[in-house]
Image: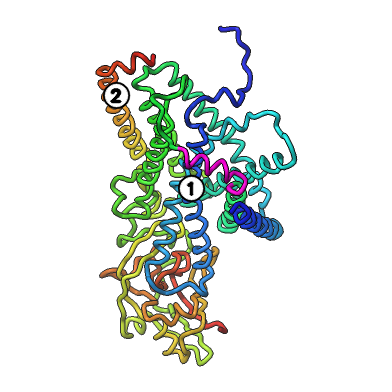
Amino acid sequence: MTGRKLRPPAERDFRGAAHDQRVTARIGLWLGIAFGICFLTGLLSQLARAGSGWPTSPVDLYRVTQGAHVVAGVAAIPLLLAKLWSVYPKLFARPLVRSLPHAIERGSILVLSGAALFEVVTGLFNVAQNYVWGFGFPAAHHVAGWLAIGSVLVHVAVKLPVIRRGLTRGDGGERSAPPGGILTRRGFLRGTGLATGVAVVATAGAAVPLLRPVSPLSWRSDRGPQGVPVNRTARAAGVRAVDDSWRLTVVTPGGTRAFSLAELRALPQTSASLPIACVEGWNQSASWTGVPVADLLRLAGGAPGSPVRVRSLERRGAYRSSLLPGAHAADPATLLALRLGDEPLALDHGYPCRLIAPSRPGVTQTKWVTRLEVEPR
Amino acid sequence: MRAVFALAGVAALAWGGWLALEFALGARNWAQVLVWLVGAPLVHDLVVAPAVGLTGLAVARVVPVAWRAPVALGAALSGLLALLAVPLLWRPFGVATNPGLHDRDYVTGLAVALGVVWLGVAVAGLTAGVTAGLTGRGRREQ
């Protein structure tokens, strides 16, 4: 026992090089870039889910933007933790509030750290399909994204002179860590860079197949049937293998027609190499064979170009139907796929037929399709 | 320049506030979002950051100089990997394992990753020890 009383720390107790403003400014810059990528690709994902206005080519567009979203989000985790550690001493600055602008600034930092942590934590749990919350993730993640980017921009505006000073002064130059510290400024920065690399490599196998062997925390594996992961099994969706009475009904303003599975198989088949690209960042390209949706619409008496409501055998769930935008419905690569690779679709992949369209989020590639309805343009 | 950032930021915050209001009026469980928004920084400031600080203090007191930086970095990387693994290992609210998704052996994966990290720490510590022994720097700093 030293006899010293325990007391909360004061700002001056933190003597590590991590708390130098040159370090804060640099990590803040990196974090700002990661958050910027997350924000922009997040908006693109919203646009892709909404459908209209999202382009049909390149076919890999959504896979790239969403992969970038998730990888940048993972990179933001160590950067955010390093940034918060760098400025943690300021939490203990006294007086708590010096003036009204100071109070507003401190308040804005609470919004900033709340929204930023909310985004990375909910994002990380969501890619693992681990829904620890009772709210709708896409809407909440979207709202907090705006709050995060807004408070980042305000924070940059407030701190700009400090950031400039921090960035223009060199980050190195010390011979050793400060007394009581462990790392030099450059050591802390390099450590943060290393941690960011480790976080990305440890998880990015989900989005980048090449990294999967060295990516122990990748949330996808190669074990899905026919080489493609399954996000919702037939069992979870309450769908059973269909019998001969199954029909695909195509409803257009010019007429309605029902197709049996044998009739669909007898129609001219098209093959396309298209990725399933999920909002969770994983993606898998595969060779799909089936009938172009545009052909089916024409056979039923319609003209492709209007949006098409695609309905599934699935009874419950937010994704039991999807709206195929007009441009995608008219694209000759948009298929009602009957085969994956050399085999009929596995039941978990949507047997007897599923929608597969270029450059669309996975949740909109409806499985177990039973009905196509042309909607008013 | 500052005005541009400030204006863009206030505009984004206003839009975010509007969306938040819409969300609160339309969604079930909106109050949970609030709990997460406030709870996350509290958990960070009261648990994560103090853990980092106390680990740093312990390393600075207990570990020989040449080993301090590698051990501190190894501890940080271990904590980071453990945090990244939480949603994969702790899944009371996770969906049933899907074929091809979150169906790998994450306990072994995490153990291997931690093994690689601490192997790196050992190599860095030993080579730093050799360097410090040659230059005598380590002793002076002690």
The answer to which image quadrant residue A217 occupies is top left
How many marks are shown on the rendered structure?
Answer: 2
Q: Residue at x 49, y 37 (%)?
A: A22
Q: Is residue A245 above or below residue A25?
A: below
Q: Chain of mark 1?
A: A
How far apart in space, not on screen, are marks 1 and 2 (Cα)? Answer: 36 Å
Q: Is residue A261 magenta?
A: no
The residue furthest right is A100
The answer to whether residue A162 is seen in the rendering is yes
Tell me if A258 is positioned left or right of A271 in this view.
Answer: right
Which residue corresponds to mark 2?
B128
Instruction: Tell me the SS state at disc 2.
Output: helix
> Is residue A159 on the magenta stretch?
yes
* Residue A162 drawn at (x, y percent): 56, 41
Q: Position of residue A65 (x, y in %)?
A: 43, 61
Image location (x, y in percent) of residue A183: 42, 27
Is A100 on the left or on the right of A133, as rendered?
Answer: right
Looking at the rendered structure, the kind of residue marked 2 is: Ala
In the picture, measured across the screen, residue B15 lies left or right of residue A304, that is right
Frontmost residue, A131 versus A234:
A131
A182 or B75: nearer the viewer: A182
Is mark 1 in CB contact (under 8 Å) with mark 2? Answer: no
Q: Nearer the viewer, residue A77 or A28?
A: A28
Instruction: Read off the residue under disc 1.
Output: A124
Is disc 2 on the same chain as disc 1?
no
Tell me the magenta residue range.
A156-169
Q: Main secondary structure of the magenta part?
A: helix
